[in-house]
Amino acid sequence: MPYLLQVDFPYQGPWGEEMATAMSGLAQSIAQEPGLIWKIWTENQAAQEAGGIYLFQDQPSAEGYLAMHTQRLKSFGVPQVNGKIFAVNDTLSRIDRAPL
């Protein structure tokens, strides 16, 4: 069963294409994480927040990544990292065209 991880944290920028350029190496690293199926990068400049929505193959992979990523973000000076893990209901999600 896949698991969804939702992460958000305070972020001062850069945004948009500047963020894409600055975070390209990090994105390449995240793509290699065990159990990761995909990640959607999120940003809200008005609220000064960034984060991501991740789909993992299983709960242990999601939990392990959240623990590691929280420590990584804190080492970057991020004071608060919010993370939630959810089981995915495949049947209902497929009805609504989820990319599972």
Image: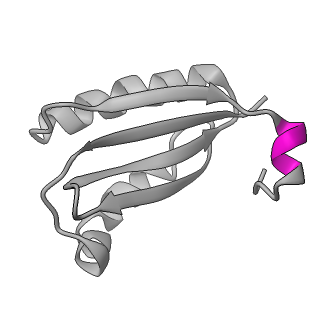
| Position of 38 relative to 21 (above/below) | above
Residue farthest toward the bottom in the current orientation of the protein: 17
Q: In the drawing, does residue 33 fall left or right of residue 46?
A: right
Res 76 → quadrant: top left
The reply, left or right, for residue 36 in relation to residue 6 is right
Residue at x 53% of width, y 35% of height: 5
Q: Position of residue 29 (x, y in %)?
A: 40, 51
Residue 2 x/y as whole percent: 73, 34
**Residue at the (16%, 63%) spot, across then down:** 13
Image x and y of residue 68, in percent: 35, 28
What is the chief secondary structure element of the magenta stretch? helix
Q: Is residue 14 magenta?
A: no
Magenta extent: 90-94
Horizontal relation, residue 68 to residue 60: left or right: left
Which quarter of the picture shows residue 99?
bottom right
The quadrant in which the N terminus is found is top right
Asked if 62 appears above or below 92 in the picture, the reply is above
Residue drawn at x 90%, y 39% as measured from the top left: 91
Question: Please, which residue is most extreme toward the front here?
Answer: 46
47 up-or-down from 77: above or below: below
Picture quadrant of residue 14: bottom left
